[in-house]
Image (cartoon, helix red, strand yellow):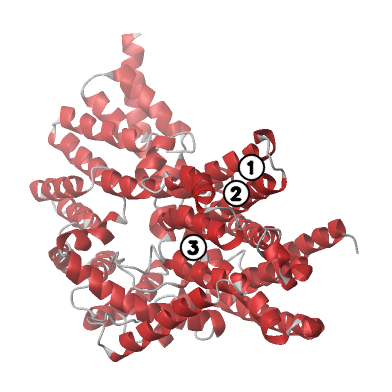
Amino acid sequence: MSLFKFRFIAVLILCCLGFIIYSNTFSNSFHFDDDYYILSAWAIRDFSNPGSIWDLWPTRFIVFLSFALNYRFDGLSVFGYHLFNLSIHIVCAIFVWWLVRLIFATPVIGKSGIAGSANLFAFFAGLIFLAHPIQTQAVTYIFQRATSLAAFFYLLSLCLYIKSRLLQVKLRPSPASKWITPYVFSWLAACLAMFTKENTFTLPLMIILLEFSFFAQEKQRKLKSALPFLLLLPIIPLLIIFTKPVVYTDIQPLLDQPWRAGSQYFFTQLRVMVTYLRLLILPFNQNLDYDYPLYQSLLDLPVLISFIFLSSLIILAIKIFHRHRLLSFSIFWFFLALLPESSIIPIRDLIYEHRLYLPMAGFGIFLASITYYLLGEKNLKFIILILIFLIHWYAVSTYSRNMDWRDAFTLWNDTISKSPRKARPYNERGYFYYMHGDFTKAIADYNKAIELDPHYATAYFNRGFAYQEKQDFNRAIFEYSKAVEMNPNYVEAYNNRGVIYRNNGRLEDAIADFSMAIERDSRSVKAYLNRGIIYREKGDLGSAVSDFNKVLKINPSLSLAYYHRGFAYFLRKEYIKSWQDLEKAEASGLKADPEFINNLRRVLGKEN
């Protein structure tokens, strides 16, 4: 078989297998963070306004831009979002295949015995990456496109970088016209990665690891090639510090109590990394929301054992570096790819399976090559059979795991069965019951969540929402008050309590709550809109118009804001402006009050 034909078939198999094992995901519902960052995110509704998308989360600007693109073509139909996610995953698997092929072409590995089977092992590394069930969270969970899309740019950058370096090595003296194009595009892909997810911070360090692992040139030449990428290292830290996106709250404890917060998280992550390794090797009992303890000391026995084990792995990688570069490189890849999320930065959630998406590339290389080193070249057919068996097992497990993601009920039922002492799964299942109108079961789950965690602000908020739907407004106010007591920055709790106050005629209390919400989130559309309506009802038309203007600055397509501003303009006798706003509201599908429209037409008719 010709090399071109083999490569074509390899890519075709990766594409077909990917669609087969994820074929049961296309109708899976939105989940968890999808509700806030997709279903409720006004910014992604307007693809033509990248400024609003940037404000949503600067270090993930590319991700939200892709959601805006999805929304423009698919609205909130899940099929398009899943298709995009799966396509990215398949391309990432192809990049892993390409990356391994390029590594086999480098001066160091190209001379080794395993190089004769380069195409075969590259193909299996890509298949392992594609089919492993640990990847389901990053593919099937729509919001975790952030992880797979970041890996897309990360892997593309590495592939193009090695391609450029190979041209430099093979064409000595190497004319810039030959290698500069892939080098520049590698750097541009690295830039895009930095605006996709924070874990791509390690990309310049991974390039240095590639240089020292697979290129034999002198140290000065290696650093010179990597230097433009090292200049990208400050991008993510500076973006987080100056724009303060959602993840800034994770580093705040590190700034307040650096030793306590950093050490506890680090000790816990030693244990978490062992769990990650277990999930890579034996992907059983997968869980969206692990109930994981926070460890306080290195001397805690599970932490100490984990530290010894992980240290032994690193020492092993150093010792085998010269004899088995692929194995050594794949071990270092695992630790380096996990570094941003498993170090000293105290991320709120201790463990998530999607964090293994990028480390899986290293595991694919490790698994494909370790079988060769253990069994030898003479047993190549046996090695192929072993790898085919593993990939078949992974594919079946992935298909099965995707069934758990079918809807919120199946997902959180599965999670509760595996984390029965954790509050959040009960809260999320309660939200599913609430959305389906079963407020009694919803409240029962919220009660259980609060029983397990009496300081769980979200459960109080959701219980308040359920009582509000049951028309028990006094109890709803109590629950919202408990939510803001537990979390003084709970914007939605202020908003909802303010709505109840407004409906009960307590307008000053309502204005105070909406103002508190705005103070804590200057982009709270609901708070500005609700406060503006009250100002209009109180006759403070200037303040009302000001609030509606702020709403439309945040979300220029919100028809309700045009309608209410048009009403305020009418009361101010600015009839032309009122008519213009009502036209914009109706153009967006909102049906205005016929009596109001007739009155406005009469007035405009008299003026004309």
Residue 135, can we see it? no
Residue located farthest toward the right when viewing the structure as drawn: 1
Foreground of the two, 606 or 396: 396
The quadrant the C terminus occupies is top left
Q: CA distance from mark 1 to mark 3?
A: 38 Å
Q: Quick one: label 3 or label 2, which is nearer the N terminus?
A: 3
- Dot 1, how many residues are within 10 Å of its Cα: few (below 14), some (14-19), or many (20+)? some
Residue at point 35% right, 39% down?
560
Residue at point 55% right, 68% down?
329
Residue 566 rendering spot, x and y as whole percentages: 31, 28
Q: Secondary structure at mark 3?
A: loop
Q: Secondary structure at mark 1?
A: helix
Q: Which residue is mark 1?
A: 182
- Are the residues tagged 1 and 3 within 8 Å (C-beta)? no
Say which amino acid is labelled 3: Phe
Residue 414, can we see it? yes
Residue located farthest toward the top when viewing the structure as drawn: 608
Mark toward the viewer: 3 or 2: 2
Q: CA distance from mark 3 to mark 2?
A: 36 Å
Q: Which residue is mark 3?
A: 30
Q: Which residue is mark 2?
A: 161
Is 232 displayed left or right of 327 in the figure? left
